[in-house]
Image (cartoon, helix red, strand yellow):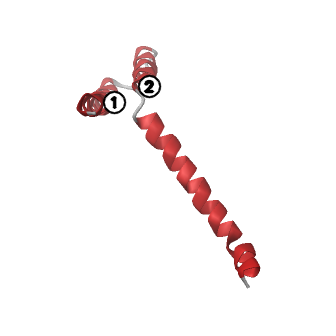
């Protein structure tokens, strides 16, 4: 009985495992200062190359700077 349950639930367990791994990668990416700084540099390059306007640049820059501030604050509180 348990073997049949394991076989039937294997796809669901696989999806859950993949979901957890994706969540771990996202958490790591969102808490890494280096990746945020890299995103800021790419954003500035897009702005300088006239791929985005100033309003969009300011909006995205504010979001990234807030995220960077949150990461630094969290590290300080550890």
Q: Give left or right: position of 73 versus 52.
A: left
| Residue shown at the point (34%, 31%) measured from the top left | 60
Quarter of the picture holding the C terminus:
top left
Q: Give left or right: position of 70 versus 22.
A: left
Q: CA distance from mark 1 to mark 2?
A: 8 Å
Q: Is residue 76 above or below residue 10?
A: above
Front position in the image: 56 or 36:
36
The residue identified by callout 2 is 39
Quarter of the picture holding the N terminus:
bottom right
Q: Residues within 10 Å of mark 1 (few under 14, many from 20)?
A: some
| Residue shown at the point (33%, 30%) measured from the top left | 64
Number of labels in the image equals: 2
Q: Position of residue 13 (x, y in %)?
A: 63, 65
Q: Position of residue 42 (x, y in %)?
A: 46, 21
| Residue shown at the point (75%, 80%) measured from the top left | 4
Q: Give left or right: position of 53 versus 6.
A: left
Q: Position of residue 68 (x, y in %)?
A: 31, 28
Question: Residue 41's image quarter?
Answer: top left
The residue identified by callout 1 is 64
Q: Is residue 68 above or below residue 3?
A: above
- Mark 2 residue element: helix
- Mark 1 residue element: helix
Question: Residue 44's image quarter?
Answer: top left
Of pointers 1 and 2, the one earlier in the residue sequence: 2
Front position in the image: 12 or 55:
12
| Residue shown at the point (44%, 42%) measured from the top left | 27
> CB under 8 Å between callouts 1 and 2?
yes
Q: Is residue 68 above or below residue 8?
A: above
Say the numbered circle drawn on residue 15. none
Q: Residues within 10 Å of mark 2 (few under 14, many from 20)?
A: some
Q: Is residue 42 above or below residue 16?
A: above
């Amino acid at each position: 009985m348990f073997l049949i349950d394991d076989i039937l639930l294997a796809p669901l367990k696989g999806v859950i495992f993949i979901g957890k791994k994706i969540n771990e990668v996202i958490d790591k990416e969102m808490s890494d200062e280096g990746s945020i700084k890299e995103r800021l540099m790419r954003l500035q390059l897009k702005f300088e190359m006239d791929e985005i306007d100033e309003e969009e640049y300011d909006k995205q820059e504010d979001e990234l700077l807030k995220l960077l501030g949150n990461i630094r604050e969290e590290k300080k509180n550890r």
